[in-house]
Image: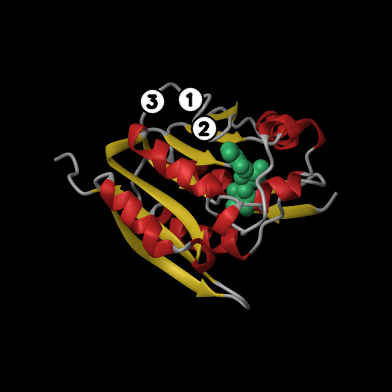
Amino acid sequence: MPTLKFKEYSLDIPARVYLPSDDTDLLLLVLEKEVISTGKTFVKAIDIGAGNALLSLALYPVVKEIYSTDINPIVIDYLLNLKERYNLDKMKIVYSNLFDSIDKNEGFDLLVFNPPYVPTEELIEDEDLDQINGYDLAVNGGEYGREVIDKFIEQLPSHLERNGVCYLLVSSLNKPEELIELLSNKGLKTEVATSKRLFFEEIFVLRITWVCQQM
Ligand SMILES: C[S@@+](CC[C@H](N)C(=O)[O-])C[C@H]1O[C@@H](n2cnc3c(N)ncnc32)[C@H](O)[C@@H]1O
């Protein structure tokens, strides 16, 4: 079990839980610049697919409450231990497939999601969860790496507050121009916060807000 130092935390990341990678680092970079260093406080945040918890922990000081969710039960155990060990009272751990365990119209003013975005032949189905390889669950995105991302985009409008912001990691392999159009059809504005070229793809952090924000 690799131990990772992150800020004041010492993280024992279990096997089958996603280790931080280029995508995690790119999101951390944007969150630091656009969220954490601004001095703004967020009322209710959600880190979907929290995994190793780095994004949740980075945001922890600037939120009143953060939901750290995941579909992998091994991640949920890991997060529960972390919460107890460091008295993370503002962190609520939720076992959930995307927003399935969240109330229908529960809103968040800050959302982050580093999804499974790697194109693979098929997505792991819910029935297989007992035998899951958590790493596959963290990376396998089905056709064009889009299956989880598309469902997320479908559900996002019910959970993004009018003045809220969502940071979503996507890859050039996911046909990002199509994603931006899907979001636009839902009344959402998408900007590229930053990007990074990797060996066989480019990854982007999308900043998503409502076109009509609340005054
Ligand atoms: C690429 S990892 C990101 C982990 C961590 N947030 C990071 O940035 O390093 C994707 C995470 O999403 C979780 N995940 C995959 N499908 C999901 C779904 N449908 N709902 C919630 N979480 C999901 C995986 O278990 C995994 O922990």
The alpha-carbon separation of the residues under discs 2 and 1 comes to 10 Å
Q: Which mark is residue 67?
A: 2
Where is residue 55 shown, x and y percent of the image?
A: 55, 49
> Mark 3 falls on what kind of element?
loop
Q: Which mark is residue 203?
A: none
Q: Is mark 1 within 8 Å of ligand 1?
A: no
The residue that mark 1 highlights is 102
Three-letter code, disc 3 = Glu
Badges 1 and 3: C-beta atoms under 8 Å apart? yes
Badges 2 and 1: C-beta atoms under 8 Å apart? yes
Q: Is residue 215 left or right of residue 206?
A: left
- In which of the image's four quarters is ligand 1 placed? top right
Residue pictured at 21% horizontal, 49% vertical:
211
Mark 3 surroundings within 10 Å by alpha-carbon count, few (fewer than 14), some (14 through 19), many (20 or more): few
Q: Which mark is residue 106?
A: 3
The alpha-carbon separation of the residues under discs 3 and 2 comes to 12 Å
Q: Is residue 121 visible in the rendered structure shown here? A: yes
Residue pictured at 79% horizontal, 44% vertical:
133
